[in-house]
Image: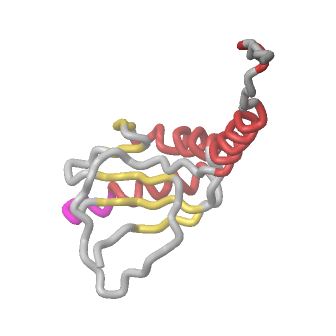
Amino acid sequence: MARKRIREDDEAQIDITPMMDIVFIMLIFFIVTTSFVKEAGIDVNKPESTQAEQRPSATIFIAIRPNGEIWMDRRMVDVERVAANIERLVAESPTDTIIIQADKETQHGRVMEVMDQIKAAGDYIITIAGEQ
């Protein structure tokens, strides 16, 4: 009886190269199509509104605390730097809507200063966030 010797080189192997190609293509697709939201970085106590509407989400949020601090992209900024920060954030993630999240104890004048800076940065839709 003749015996066949099976060499280790003759064993079947699975080629995973096509699978890796597909995984990398999917990864690139998800990275490119993901929209990144630039949140303000703090929570504020927004005023309540009976007529508040759900709007499409924007990618730029500006939070104003009761003491007048302005927060963008998880850091505090001066009111004079709001326009420059908006231009930087829009360059990273284009949008036409900016949401202001002002605390209900924030002075109206501070909100107007921020709105003036937004208008100085460009023609954006300004939305004031409220609780429903």
89 and 37: which is toward the camera = 37
Give percent across and percent down for residue 80.
Answer: 45, 40
24 and 109: which is toward the camera = 24
Number of numbered markers: 0
Question: Residue shown at 21%/62% (left/top)?
Answer: 45
Task: Answer left or right for 14 relative to 40.
Answer: right
15 and 131: which is toward the camera = 15
Task: Answer left or right for 10 relative to 130.
Answer: right
Colouring method of the image: secondary structure
* 106 w.r.t. 93: above or below: below
Residue 34 is one of the magenta-drawn residues: no
For the C terminus, the quadrant is bottom left
Question: Residue shown at 38%/48% (left/top)?
Answer: 40
Quarter of the rendering containing residue 26: top right
Task: Answer left or right for 108 relative to 37.
Answer: left
Residue 117 visible within the image: no
Give percent across and percent down for residue 47.
Answer: 25, 71
Work out which residue is located at the far bottom of the displayed protein and give it: 51
Work out which residue is located at the far front of the displayed protein and give it: 1
Residues rendered magenta in the picture: 104-109
Give percent across and percent down for residue 41.
Answer: 34, 45
Question: Residue shown at 52%/40% (left/top)?
Answer: 85
> What secondary structure characterizes most of the magenta part?
loop
Quarter of the rendering containing residue 96: bottom right
102 and 19: which is toward the camera = 19
For the N terminus, the quadrant is top right
* 72 w.r.t. 17: above or below: below
